[in-house]
Image (cartoon, rainbow, N blue to C red):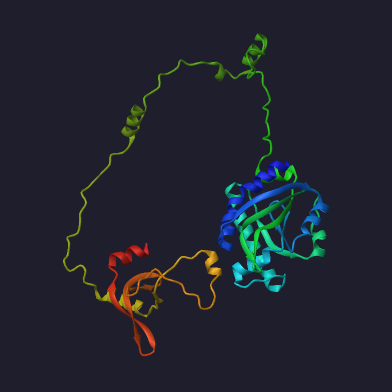
Amino acid sequence: MEAQVLEQGLKNQLPAVEEFLKAILLKKINVEVSATSVADAEMVVEALKTGTAVVSVKDQIFNTTVFIAFDDNWIPQLSTAMLGVEEQEVNEITRDLIKEFTSQLFGTIQVSLQADEIPVEPGPVEILKSAQIASGVTGQNYFIAQVDVSGKFTIDGDEQPQLAMIVAFEVPDEDTINEIMGLGEPEVISAPASKASASADTASDDDIEAAFAEMPIAQKETKPAQPAQPKKDKEREKAKDLPPVSSRPVEFEDFNPFSDVKSEVEVRNLDILKEVELDISVELGRKELPLGDVLHLVRGSVIELDKLAGEPVEIYANGHRIAEGEVVVIDEHFGVRITNLVSTKERIESLR
């Protein structure tokens, strides 16, 4: 596969990667590919060793491994954005942070590739030590690229213009790509030629007469063409053969004004349901937050809800809204005083 095709395929995923990084880093950034090359295993090992943290993910569909090497600025930037504490070194906390970040990144890329009808299934993320990189790079042909993330990053009090990472993956062979993507050449099935089906411009008169002589007598006889019978006339003839349909008027029962009165049997049936327990929950309000804001939450953070002060709270039974009320205090416990019941029609609609 040509390097230009691989480079264009990588660039097609940059918009999805950029949106993902914006949600994580909460900054205006720009993602671009600054350099690409086709490399062998030795060149890939040397490039990956320049990173502070190196991860590998094996794709289960193409059976190839993708490597990413993050430079020195990624760990403090990610730890500040996702943990609220700036970390400078690779330790147990930052290793888990890099694994979680990379797993979400590959999940974003997987969705983007599947939208382009490219099936991928990334496996678990592994962090490689420097001595493990050479043993992990076992392929022959690799595509390697440097991806730069530019923006205003403040790390350890200094402003850094960009973050960089090296991406390398083994290039599958053409047969594997064609088999998975269904790009194989269609098989051409040639039917055996017979004397009767030979074309007129290639078959001689003697061959045509011989083939006609071998045909069954039933096929030699010809009948005068019959005029096509209209479709409506055929339907009428079929309808004549059907048996007659018997019908009778529909009889409705008289309306009883006391039909809503429940019988003793119905009352006993309702009594059976009285012991059924329902989960009652009270919703004070809601708020939608991006993933980056959720990761920034710490002890003491305040979330502003969509409810205004004094507005009634909503009461739910098994997840279905049944009433509204106001919050009260009963001794040392919170309570809710019901101020409005949801109509029966609305409750029925919520169950559909």
Residue 224 percent coordinates (x, y): 46, 15
Q: Residue at x 35, y 83 (%)?
A: 335
Report if residue 349 is visible in the image: yes
User: Which image quadrant is residue 349 in?
Assistant: bottom left
Q: Residue at x 62, y 54 (%)?
A: 109
Residue 111 percent coordinates (x, y): 59, 54
* 30 over 5 or under it: above or below: below
* 210 over 126 or under it: above or below: above
| Front-most of residues 214 and 130 | 130
- Farthest-out residue, front: 158
Residue 136 percent coordinates (x, y): 79, 59
Q: Is residue 234 left or right of residue 111?
A: left
Residue 126 percent coordinates (x, y): 72, 64
* 327 over 319 or under it: above or below: below
Report if residue 111 is visible in the image: no
* 238 over 201 or under it: above or below: below
Q: Residue at x 64, y 47 (%)?
A: 11
Q: Residue at x 69, y 49 (%)?
A: 34
| Front-most of residues 49 and 176 | 49
Q: Is residue 156 left or right of residue 330?
A: right
Of the 4 image quadrants, the one containing the C terminus is: bottom left
